[in-house]
């Protein structure tokens, strides 16, 4: 009978650690340790596992060392190994196969042909993702979206009717756009551009011109925030050249164009886009908006937030305050990050105007709400409030916000730059072509 001490002596004689052995035979270190101390029984399967890994004989498996196993013996060993693994798992002691490796072997291939049921699955998953992401649960939502997008992309080259194709490609494009935007907000701008470019290509193959324009808007924002406002302007030019987009999306495009102009130091051009955005809003009709737009572009408070942020960037403080206040009042509770971006700017406006107590209240409200939000934009906005507090003689508020930012966002506050076009030194403003 082989004892636990026998197994331990054999392992140590071969210079193999318990950690290494545990990993190789897929049984936890704690369980093996208890076996070697005599606190757990030595099973034939475990003896065989030691022999296989250590490459030497163990008493319970010795005999005719060179004799081949019969089929029945191999099956018996496999059965005992399975039962041993199950027994270890039942007490939480199994060292299981890494989940990624297990998932690789699961069936999940796409169908040979695609119908409306697959399209509806993509659309439903995208709606769920959007709800989770807009509410601020970006990490969980992104993990889910990656898997859905991978499967969705595999459908694109399958057999399908023209009707199915016209609906599938925009659905995949919307999912890729939302995932690309979340990727940008995590700080991975180059990868975001790749995802958004794919989203643009997919959405362009459908009939939803607003979606195509919105993806281009997202692309322009990423490019501008990377320090290339002239390229961002050029992207918006292409989007605004499509007369088929709705007035709601036109207003959105002009509001973002105004913000890009602020980044480029083109104040008058930015104000012209504000006028065009407001004109487009006067023609806006929500009745014809697609479902995704109802969640974003034509959702309550969205245009107020877009215009408020643009006016803030342009230095139009009073007009910005009016729009941002309306946005905070109207925005749905699911628009967490957008609400935070408005609230931080209102805090800055209060502090600039000398309403220090009101500004401090808003700043601390924003910091509290940002606790569980992982967003480079929100982090940059908080940094902007910190800079404003310091410049206006509020060191205690600046210190408190710095502590919150470091603790809750996991970032170095000094390394977080201000949002593009806002409170930037003159030498960082880059000229862009006039729109």
Image (spheres, rainbow, N blue to C red):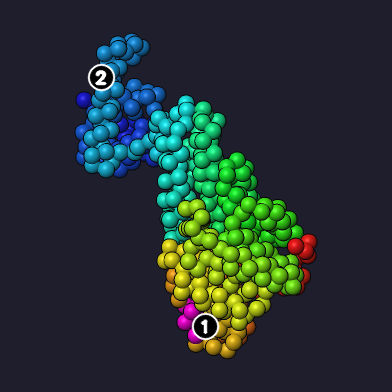
Quadrant in the picture for the N terminus: top left
The disc label shown at residue 359, or none: 1
How many numbered marks does the figure carry? 2
Q: Nearer the viewer, residue 62 or 75?
A: 75
Across and down, in percent, residue 403 comes to 50, 73
Element type where label 1 sits in the image? helix
In the image, is 278 to the left or to the right of 341?
right
What x and y, as percent, mark residue 402? 53, 74
User: Would you say residue 200 is visible in this rendering?
Assistant: yes
Residue 395 to residue 59: above or below:
below
**Mark 1 or 2, closer to the camera:** 1
Which residue is painted at 67% across and 52% down in the image?
Answer: 242
Pick the front one: 142 or 333: 333
| Real-space Cα separation, disc 1 to disc 2, in angstroms | 74 Å
Quadrant of the snapshot with the C terminus: bottom right
> Helix or strand or loop: what does disc 2 sit on?
helix
The stretch of residues the image draws in magenta is 358-364
Q: Which mark is residue 76?
A: 2
- Residue 176 in view: no
Q: Residue 364: x and y, percent?
A: 47, 77
Does label 1 or label 2 sit earlier along the sequence? 2
């Amino acid at each position: 009978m082989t004892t636990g001490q026998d197994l331990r002596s054999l392992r140590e004689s071969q210079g193999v650690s318990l950690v290494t052995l545990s990993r190789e035979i897929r049984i936890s270190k704690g369980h093996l340790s208890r076996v070697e101390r005599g606190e757990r029984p030595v099973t034939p399967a475990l003896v065989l596992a030691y022999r296989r890994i250590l490459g030497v004989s163990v008493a319970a498996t010795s005999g005719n060392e060179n004799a081949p196993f019969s089929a029945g013996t191999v099956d018996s060993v496999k059965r005992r190994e399975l039962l041993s693994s199950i027994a270890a798992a039942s007490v939480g002691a199994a060292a299981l196969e890494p989940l990624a490796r297990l998932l690789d072997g699961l069936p999940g291939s796409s169908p040979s042909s695609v119908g409306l049921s697959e399209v509806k699955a993509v659309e439903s998953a995208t709606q769920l993702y959007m709800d989770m992401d807009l509410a601020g649960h970006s990490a969980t939502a992104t993990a889910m979206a990656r898997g859905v997008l991978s499967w969705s992309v595999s459908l694109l080259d399958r057999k399908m009717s023209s009707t199915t194709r016209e609906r599938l490609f925009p659905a995949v494009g919307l999912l890729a756009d939302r995932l690309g935007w979340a990727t940008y907000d995590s700080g991975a701008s180059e990868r975001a551009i790749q995802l958004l470019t794919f989203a643009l290509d997919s959405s362009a193959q459908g009939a939803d011109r607003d979606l195509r324009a919105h993806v281009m808007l997202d692309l322009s924002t990423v490019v501008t925030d990377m320090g290339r406002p002239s390229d961002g302007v050029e992207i918006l030019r292409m989007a605004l050249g499509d007369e088929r987009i709705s007035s709601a999306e036109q207003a959105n495009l002009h509001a973002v164009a105004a913000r890009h102009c602020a980044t480029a130091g083109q104040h008058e051009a930015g104000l012209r886009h504000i006028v065009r955005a407001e004109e487009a809003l006067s023609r806006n009709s929500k009745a014809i908006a697609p479902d995704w737009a109802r969640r974003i572009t034509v959702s309550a408070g969205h245009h107020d937030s877009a215009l408020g942020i643009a006016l803030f960037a342009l230095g139009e403080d009073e007009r910005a305050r009016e729009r941002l206040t309306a946005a905070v009042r109207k925005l749905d509770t699911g628009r967490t990050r957008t609400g935070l971006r408005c609230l931080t700017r209102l805090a800055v406006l209060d502090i600039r105007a000398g309403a220090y107590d009101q500004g401090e209240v808003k700043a601390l409200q924003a910091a509290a709400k940002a606790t569980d939000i992982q967003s480079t934009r929100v982090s940059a906005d908080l940094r902007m409030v910190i800079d404003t507090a310091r410049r206006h003689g509020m060191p205690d508020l600046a210190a408190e916000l710095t502590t919150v930012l470091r603790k809750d966002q996991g970032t170095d506050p000094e390394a977080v730059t201000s949002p593009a076009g806002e409170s930037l030194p003159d030498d960082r403003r880059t000229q862009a072509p006039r729109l």
